[in-house]
Amino acid sequence: MPLDLDHLRQWIGREETASEHVTAALVARFNATFDREGVSAQGAAGPLMLHLCLAQPVAPTSGLGPDGHPARGGFLPPVPLPRRMWAGGQMEFTGDIRIGEEMTRHSTIRDVVVKEGRSGVLCFVTVDHRISSGGRLVLNERQDIVYRPVAPAPDKAATTETAPAARKPVPAAPPGAHRLVVTPSAPLLFRYSALTFNGHRIHYDTPYVRDEENYPGLIVHGPLQATMLVHYAQSVRGKPPARFSFRSLSPLFDIADFTLNASEDEGGLRLWTSYVDGPVAMEARAEW
C-alpha cells in the first residue's frame, strides 16, 4: 500500500491523555527487572524512566495484529508499513514521579514526514509528551517513531564469496571510559515487555522473529536500552541527569552480550550501547 502523506499528516495536532496511579508494587517490579535497589514507600521518588511503564495503551488480545501490535490508527496515524521502532528522542526531567501519586501523560502528534532510507521508504512520526505527577510537571519528552518495511529474507543461495560484497563492514565501537557488560536474557526482555504492556512478538517469540521478521534473535527494546543508559549515567555521576537524548542506529539481539558505555563529553556524558566488539547500537547524551 502506497503512503498517502497528506492523509497521514491529518493526524498532526491530535492529542491524547492517559493516567495511572503509581503503586509501590509497580516500582518494586521495575527495580527487580533492572536488579536495582530502591525504596518503595509512599511518597518516595520513583526511578527515572518509570514513566515508560505507566498509562500504556490497552488493547484487547483479539484486537492485536499478527505481530502482537494493536491495530493501526487511533491516536497514532495508520502508517501502512509493517515495522514500528523507537528511533530516538529527548527528555527533560523537571521533577520526580512519586509513589502514591497519579501520573498523567498528555501527548500530541507534532509531525509526520517521509524519507528514503537504505531499506526503502521510512515514515517518521514525532510525538511530544508532557508528564505530570500529583499535578506537578515532571518531564517533557519528544519521541521519534519510525515505520519501515520488512527486510527481505536472506538469500540462502548467496555464497560466502558474494555475500560480504552486499554490505559494507561497520567499524566496532570503541570502549567507553566506563563500561558495563549486559546479558540480554529472555527473562529480562519478557519482564520489560510485561512492565510496558508491550505485546510485540519480536521481544519474546523466537520462532516468530526468525521466521517472519528475518531477524537472528529476539530484539532488545529501544526503551530498555535507553533506560539502562539513563541509570548508568546516574551511577557514573552519582546523581540523575536533567536532560537525556538518544538515537537508535542498529538493533541489538539476544544472541550475544552487549555493553553500556560512558565517556565525559563537554560537561556531560556521551553514552552508547554496542556488542562487545560490534558497532554502536544506540548513542545518547546525558547532561546535568
Image: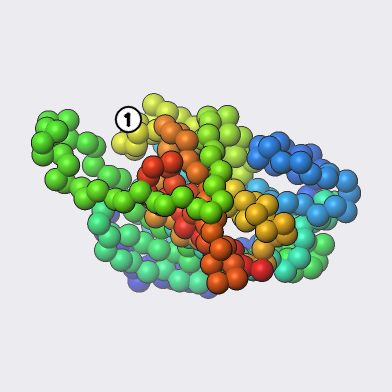
Q: Measured from the top left, where is residue 156 in percent x and y?
A: 17, 30
Can you name the residue that lies furthest to the top here? 207
Task: List x then y, in percent, for residue 38.
Answer: 79, 44
What secondary structure is found at the residue carrying circle 1?
Answer: helix
164 vs 76, left or right, is left
Residue farthest along the front direction in this orientation:
177
Q: Is residue 236 left or right of residue 168?
A: right
Q: Is residue 228 above or below residue 188?
A: below
Query: Would you say residue 62 is visible in this rendering?
Result: no
- The percent coordinates of residue 202 (x first, y second) are 44, 37
Q: Toward the viewer: 106 or 24?
A: 24
Please tell me which residue is depicted at 46% across the width and 30% down the height of the picture: 205
Residue that appears at 34% across and 37% down: 215
Residue 87 visible in the displayed image: yes
Identify which amino acid the numbered label 1 is placed on. Answer: Asp
Image spot of residue 222 (x, y percent)? 50, 49
Residue at the image position 54 percent from the left and 59 percent from the top: 263
Mark 1, other Cα within 10 Å: few <14 / some 14–19 / many ≥20? few
Q: In the image, 95: left or right of 51?
A: right
Question: Dividing the image into 4 quarters, which one contains the N terminus?
Answer: bottom left
Residue at horizontal 27%, vertical 60%? 117
Choose between 50 and 64: the one closer to the eye. 50
Q: Which residue is mark 1?
A: 211
* Foreground of the two, 156 or 12: 156
